[in-house]
Image (cartoon, rainbow, N blue to C red):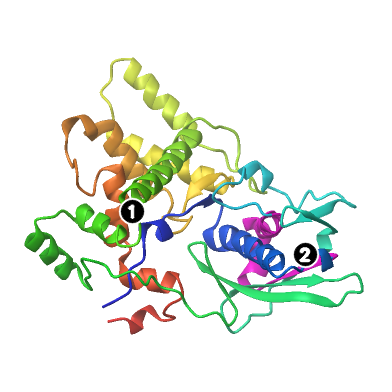
Amino acid sequence: MTAYVSAFDLFSIGVGPSSSHTVGPMRAGVDFAARLRADGLLEKVERVTCELFGSLGATGLGHGTPDAVLAGLQDLHPETCDPDDVRALWSTWPEGRDLLLAGERSIRFAKDDVSFVPRTRLPGHPNAMTLHALDAEGAPVLEQTYYSIGGGFIRRDGEESRVSAAVQPYPYDTAEELLALCDENRLSIAEIARANEMAGRSEEEVAAGLDAIWDAMYSCVDAGLHTGGTLPGMLKVKRRASTIREQLESAESDGHAQIPGEWLGAFALAVNEENAAGGRVVTAPTNGAAGILPAVAMYWWRFLADSGLGAGNAVTPYGELVGSALLGFGAEASLVAIGAIEDPDAVA
């Protein structure tokens, strides 16, 4: 039986524009600073440097990777930080400004303490980074290599892959087995998923977690629909979701029928633009795919909720979250995402 991956692992609240190149490196920075604190080493550290290898080094500037690393080192978490505190943090770092390591230890830092090494690929993964903590003499205090393995997940070099130890009440390997479980137990897909979630969390924790995920998705759609201007980057791409919203609202106010399909596209585009701008998004299961689930959930919320269609099943916002974790991304994709397996073709 394949390992179960929770909806709360697949759908994690973070920032754009990339789960692997922004969220993962930020979590690596948080983890490194936390280890220094836990080991009682913070007071010994006078400087931290970072090397971005392979893909992180090649495309890190466009993805805000060095910004994310600095934010993480200062104990800013992707789930709770203000995205404005992360955007352009490294690129606009003033000369002579100290870095507040772990949110409490002031150390010197310069922009060239982050180096880009795109031509060097470490054997563990294409998205690799090494953090070095140094003392006043430049001697190493702690050194750690991290791999950003996709979906915001990270793995330290030498660390074993982690999977949930909780025993699921409704385990399955295939869609056929899942549907059989639904028939045998007279449960919907979403109800099966919720029961599996509660193997490791209380009902209250599951409800609160889904609330937080849906609130972040809704807020992301709303922000994208009401923000104009251009996206960051040299191409100066104009944001379009807000203009589309205005056009749709104008047509409806003139007495024209609603166009649900156009709204669906606008919802997805709003999330994509927020992600590209480095805003608050939910990995689903990556930032690149973050617009699909919120768009479908918003479509149901706006156009189908009053009809009762899908009530209690996987097309409601909450049901969709747990149901999609169960079905949409599959056990194989989940295991690849967390690094439990290296080759998806090796999974039966």
Residue 162 sits in quarter: bottom left
Q: Amino acid at mark 2?
A: Leu
Residue 261: give x, y in percent of width and height: 29, 38
Q: Earlier in the sequence, mark 2 or mark 1?
A: 2
Q: Amino acid at mark 1?
A: Ser
> Which image quarter holds the N terminus?
bottom left
With respect to residue 166, does 244 lie above or below? Answer: above
Quick one: SS at disc 2? helix
Rounded to the nearest angstrom, the CA distance separating label 2 from label 1 is: 36 Å
Crowding at mark 1 (Cα within 10 Å: few <14, some 14-19, many 20+): few
Quick one: SS at disc 1? loop
> Which image quarter holds the C terminus?
bottom left
Name the chief secondary structure element in magenta: helix
Span highlighted in magenta in the image:
46-74
Of residue 133 and residue 44, the one placed in the foreground of this image is 44
Left or right: residue 104 versus residue 272 is: right
Left or right: residue 308 versus residue 138 is: left
- What residue does disc 2 label? 42
The residue located at (26%, 48%) in the rendering is 319
Residue 37: give x, y in percent of width and height: 71, 64
Is residue 61 magenta-colored?
yes
- What residue does disc 1 label? 202
Residue 247: give x, y in percent of width and height: 41, 25
